[in-house]
Amino acid sequence: MGSMRPGVRIVLAGAAAILLLPACYGSHTTIGSADGGADAPAGTCLEACTGPYTAGVIACHEEQRTCLLSCGGWDDHACSDPCETTWDACTYERDYEAERCMEDCPCWEPFMACTDGCDGGPGDDCWTACESGYGACSGDDITGMGTCLSGCAIPSMECDEACESHEGDWGAWVNCDAECQIAWVSCMGGCF
């Protein structure tokens, strides 16, 4: 069973490097604007990027499901390998689109420049300061997003484990796996 297992690659471009620490239930919050005025709306710029990304990746999984269901099983590599290649290209394109979108967010470039100067990763003082600066700029609670994204991992792993009960039934496994991946992407998309 194991060698055919399509990998799950949720990149969300540059956001993944920041937010996908170990993959939501709940959502992030607004924070006060830098000038002390009203709270900024949460997720405005990133959400505009991640909403289409999430829908696009779900469509990639649906396309892969349809393709794999036409295959004869675990050992039908002549059928399943092209399905995975098509899925890789589909999700890569969604990653690229999301990355371009995020780069257009006005707070993103200063945030990335800030983190380039950090020696450590998420959680160290430098990153925390950069996250605070990003939050003040955008209104997004980037730490809350990271917590939310991490919260998506446990139900995803539990779902994957449940699919193992379909080891002897190709079609049931393909459908179960697709539902797990779609649920994970949807969960993560709700974090922005």
Image: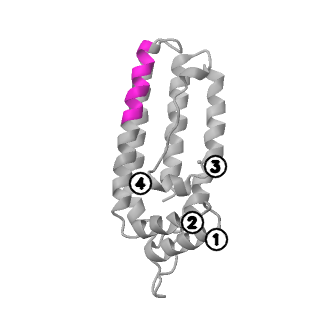
**Of callouts 4 and 1, which one flags the residue occurring earlier in the amino acid sequence?**
4
Q: Which mark is residue 22?
A: 3
Q: Hey, what amino acid is under mark 3? A: Pro
Q: Quadrant of residue 138?
A: bottom left
Residue 127: x percent and y percent? 58, 67
* Residue at which label 2 appears: 118
Q: Secondary structure at mark 1?
A: helix
- Label tally: 4
Q: CA distance from mark 4 to mark 3?
A: 19 Å
Given this view, does label 4 or label 3 mark the residue nearer the observer?
3
Q: Name the kind of residue labelled 4 in the image.
A: Thr
Tell me the distance, in whole angstroms, between the alpha carbons under discs 1 and 3. Answer: 19 Å
Disc 1, disc 3: CB below 8 Å? no
Task: Name the one closer to the observer, 75 or 56.
Answer: 75
- Mark-to-mark CA distance, 4 and 1: 27 Å
Task: Give the residue number, with chain letter if any, for mark 1.
Answer: 125
Q: Secondary structure at mark 3?
A: loop
Q: Residues within 10 Å of mark 1 (few under 14, many from 20)?
A: few
Q: Secondary structure at mark 2?
A: loop
Name the main secondary structure of what is drawn in magenta: helix
Secondary structure beneath dot 4 equals helix
Looking at the picture, tell me which residue is in the foreground, 8 or 71.
Answer: 8
- Residue behind mark 4: 50
Residue 120 in picture, x, y percent from top left = 62, 61
The quarter of the image holding the N terminus is: top right
